[in-house]
Image (cartoon, grey):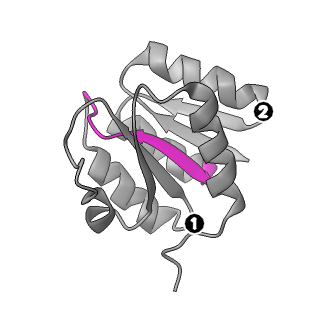
Amino acid sequence: MKVLIVESEPNLADVWCRHLRRLNMDVSVATTQAEATLQIIETCPEVMILDLILKNGSALAVSDFASYRSPETQVIFVTNTSFFSDGSIFAHAQNACAFVQSETPPDDLAAMVEYYAARPPAHTA
C-alpha cells in the first residue's frame, strides 16, 4: 500500500513514517506543496496524510491536485488548530476521508490508513 505523508514538521512526519513502515507500507514524505505534487505524480498513493497547515504551500491545493491527478487517493487531513473543526473540510476537499488532530496516536493514524486504503473512495460516482 502506497502512502504519502505531507507534513512541514520533519519530526512528526518521521514518527508517522516509522509506524506505517512497520506495517509494511510503502511511505513517501513531502514537506512542501511542490514536493507533494511531485510525489503524487510519481507514486499515486492510495492514502495521503496531509497537514492542513503547510509552511510552504497550500494543503487544499495539494488535495485538489491529488483529486485531479490521482482520483483514487483518499486524504486524511491532520491539524493542530481548530480551523475546519466544524467538519467543513469535507465540503472543500472531495477526497477527504478523515480529519484528525496532529496529536492522534501514531498507531491510531496507522489503523486509519489501513482502513481507508482497503475501502474504495466514497467520492467515486
Instruction: From the viewer's perspective, tell me whether residue 50 is left or right of residue 41.
Output: left
Q: Determine the residue positioned at 47% across, 13% down.
A: 11
Q: Secondary structure at mark 2?
A: loop
Q: Nearer the viewer, residue 66 or 94?
A: 94
The residue wearing badge 1 is 72
Q: Is residue 111 located in the magenta-colored stretch of the structure? A: no
Amino acid found under the numbered disc labelled 2: Leu
The numbered mark at residue 23 is: 2
Q: Determine the residue positioned at 30% across, 40% down.
A: 52
Which mark sits nearer the N-terminus, 2 or 1? 2
Identify the magenta region: 43-55
Determine whether 100 is above or below 92 in the image: above
Residue 40 at x, y = what percent? 52, 49
Q: Nearer the viewer, residue 71 or 11?
A: 11
Q: Determine the residue positioned at 52% across, 86% down.
A: 125
The residue positioned farthest toward the top in the image shown: 11
Cα separation, mark 2 vs mark 1, equals: 21 Å
Instruction: From the viewer's perspective, tell me whether residue 15 is left or right of residue 82.
Output: right
